[in-house]
Every structure is written in structure tokens, then in C-alpha cells.
Amino acid sequence: MRIAVLCGHYPYSGAGVIAFEAARELARAHEVAFIHGGSEELDLREEGLRRISLPLPPEPDRRPWHLFWNPAMIRKLKAALRSFQPEILHFHIVQRRSFSLAALLLSRRAPTVWTLHDQWHLCLRSVPEPPSCEGMRRLCVFCSAWPGASIAGKLLKEAVYAASPLEVVVPSRWLEELTRYSLLGRKKMHLVYNGIDLERFQPASEEAGDRAVTLLFVSGPNDPTKGLAELLQAFQALRAAHPKVKLRLVGTLPPGAPAEGIEATGSVERERMPEEYRRADLFVLPTLADNTPVTLMEAMASGLPSVATRVGGIPELVRDDVTGRLVAPGDVAGLTSALDDLVRDGAQRRAMGRAARREAEARFSRRRMAGQLEGIYRGMLGRIEMRAAGAEASAAGGAS
């Protein structure tokens, strides 16, 4: 098959990582083009696939309507697709740092799949405000953050969905259920959990029993919603009971935040992330809103137990009291207690880490993800062939 995997600005987010990992794995057996927005124009062979970068408008030139309609980027995308001639289009991210919502209308030209990674397809933002909002279940009519604008955005999106004959992939049952409150929910939907490179993310040798425990937190593009403020509060309380415990923060520490016991790395290249996980003992993700975080799957693959919040699709990744602990979002006391338990009990921490690795091997391999996607593509092409054959048979019957 000839497959075009389409993504937003790359590298940027966990969704971009998943899109690229899927493209790399699919390229083992198919002709694949990974087409994404970027800072420069590129067309090259990389890791067994064709990588095409389409320059995005400079940040000052990106207007709000580019979320919905960016004709310059769509023209570039059409040209790239003409040069590749794909049989399947697979979108991952379509908003402002990409091609725009209107790009989904290309599904009228070729069989198309859209993987949903957040709530942007239902809300004006990828992460609603407040993060716990699920007002899209009530068609956003009671939106307090963007009254009026939320309704207009929803109507525009629903109009494009109605005109786009695509199929949908969701990486969690939580997002699948939420998407039922949209026209997208009436389309053929497939549950495919994300996959990562299990060969790159491997456990370290088991920790020594007497060294200081290191917690790991990885920030991302949506920093305010990742729960860093709550983590810093919990960490200060934890240090009172465990003065040697450390927090390694991949990202930056907010101005004025207490720094004792904390090492902030700044930005870390993806090539170096496996070693960041291996040098830690416990992964922490007190996010206020999320779907299926890539960092959480990478931590599990690296043999780390996790303390995370019970939001979005996270309970589908972390098995409470088996591969980690789940706490309520915003519950600093609960977060502190869960961390304290695992800092004190090294044997339980290591047992959870081994269970996390087994879970990752069973459920989060990119080979399993690519295999499920191949099945979806073949099903789509098969249904098109059956319809064409039926139309030919009807035409032949009418002629006789």
C-alpha cells in the first residue's frame, strides 16, 4: 500500500511522536510518506520512508482562522500528495500548527483515516478550560470560557465532518465515548492504543537498595495542565519525610518555585529521553487533563512505576496498585500519600516497575499498532472495491 501519514508541526508533541512511530513501522512493509508542517521545506528519505516537510507560516502570520481554513498550507499539501499518489491518507493533527480543519475534505478524494489525540475535534482548544470540562456532551451550549465562540466553532467543525467521508481512530475508550457526542461518532470508529518503540525504551538494571529515590516529571506543550504546580507542593511535603528524595524535571522550573532537591534539565532531545527514564525510580504525571500520554507509556516501557491522575484515558494505561497508583486530579494530599508509599517501599516499587514493563510489551508496541492500522486500511480499500464491483454489476444488469 501507498500510505501518506499527515501530521502537524514535527517534532512538537506526543501526537507527533505517535504519528512518526506509526509511519516508521508501516514503512517496513509499505511505501510511506510522512508529511508534516515544519520550519523549512524538505523532501528526503529517512528511516525507510519519505519525509516531506511543508513550511508553516511564521508565528506572527498565523491567524485564528488558520485553525479552520489555511488555503496556502492546503495547496502545499495537495502538491505533496500529487507527487506521492497515496492510496490511503492518515491524518493525525490538523489544527493551527498543521494544515487546518478544511484539509479533512481531502477525504473526498482518497480513503482517509483520522486519529484523534486530544479534544480539539470537540472543543475550541486541545485541552478545555477548565481542563475537567466535558461540556461537549451538552453541545457546548453552557460554555463559560468562550460563550458563543464555542458554538460557532462546533458548527464549523460539524459541517466539515458531515462533508468528510473518513473513518476515525481513537487511542482510548474514554475518547471514543466522548466522541459519540459529535457527527464523528456516527462514522466508523476504531479503538487502537498508541504504540512506542519498546527496543529504545528499556528498563535499567534494578536500582540499588540504598540510593536516594529519584522521581521523574516530563513537561510538555500544555505545561499548565500537566500538574506541575500540584507536584511541586507534594514534593515539598515529601521532602519533609524523605530529605534525600530527588525530583528530576525534564523542562523548566517556574520562576520563584522552590528548587531544593529539584534538577531541571531544560529541553531534552528525544534521542536522549530513554536514558532520562532509566536514571529514575518513579514516574509522576499529576496532569489535570489528558488522553493517553506518550510519556506515561515510555515510562512503563522503561520499567518505571507511575503515580498519575485518574483522568481521560490514563486509567486504561495504568493499573492501579499493579503498575502504579492513580489519584484524583488536583488532590495534593492524595498525590503526596501515593508518592510517600512508593518512596518508602522499594520492593513494591520494583515489582510495579516489572509489571509496567510487561504491560507495555503486551499492549503498547508500535508493531501491534501498525498491524491494527493495516487492518483498517485493508478494510477500507476492500469496501471500496466491493462497492465498485457492485456498481459494475448493477450497470451490467441494467444494460441487459
Image: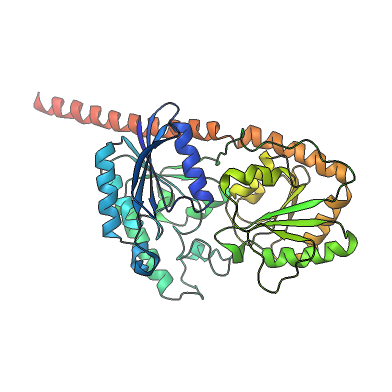
**Residue 3 place in picture, x, y as percent:** 36, 35
**Residue 364 place in picture, x, y as percent:** 60, 37
Give the farthest residue toward the top. 400
Viewer-side residue, 249 vs 324: 249
Relative placement, left or right, of 1 versus 330 is: left
Residue 317 visible (yes or no): no
**Residue 138 place in picture, x, y as percent:** 49, 65
**Residue 55 place in picture, x, y as percent:** 34, 54
200 vs 184: above or below: above
Colour scheme of the picture: rainbow
Give the farthest residue toward the left. 399
182 vs 377: above or below: below
Quadrant that contains the N terminus: top left
Number of marks in the image? 0
Relative placement, left or right, of 225 versus 217 is: left
Identified at 51% across, 44% down, the residue is 18
141 vs 104: above or below: below
Residue 122 visible (yes or no): yes
Quadrant that contains the C terminus: top left
Identified at 57% across, 39% down, the residue is 196
